[in-house]
Amino acid sequence: QVQLAESGGGLVQAGGSLRLSCQASGSVAEVLIMGWYRQVPGKQRELVALIHVDKHTRFADSVQGRFTISMDNDKSTVYLQMNSLKPEDTAVYYCNSDLIDQFGSEGNYWGQGTQVTVSS
């Protein structure tokens, strides 16, 4: 069984920074992609940023230049550094990963989400 454990959410003032972490654990053989999505009530979940095992990254236009993403392959952990936060960044942030488990099966997994609130 695979688990994604997120940490680092919280309340911050506009202009501030937060760092989210997510570690994949359990029957993980190889992580292929890790990323972050976010969702606000009444809206669809949207991509924030993702990173491939070869370090190729992709960002939503709304966070480009403010957020960075990195991955520690050995620890199966992804980090999202969020700077210059805006009230519109307020959302539940979900970790996501495409990975291969110990049985050789590729699957997509979600974390339970962590709340990020940016006050104006």
Image (cartoon, grey):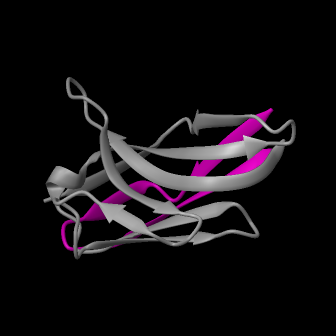
Residue 31 location, quadrant:
bottom right
In which quadrant is the C terminus drawn? bottom left
Residue 40 percent location from the top left of the image = 26, 35
- Residue 3, compared with residue 14, is above or below; it is above
**Pick the front one: 67 or 12:** 67
Residue 64 location, quadrant:
bottom left
Q: Which residue is at a point 34% across and 43% down the rendered structure image?
A: 38
- Residue 73, compared with residue 4, is above or below; it is below
Say left or right for 2 vs 12.
right
Q: Is 15 colored magenta in this rendering?
A: yes
Say left or right for 113 vs 91.
right
Residue 57 percent location from the top left of the image = 40, 67
- Report the magenta residues as a range: 1-26
Residue 12 percent location from the top left of the image = 31, 63
Residue 37 percent location from the top left of the image = 38, 45
The rendered magenta stretch, by its main secondary structure, is classed as strand
**Pick the front one: 84 or 66:** 66
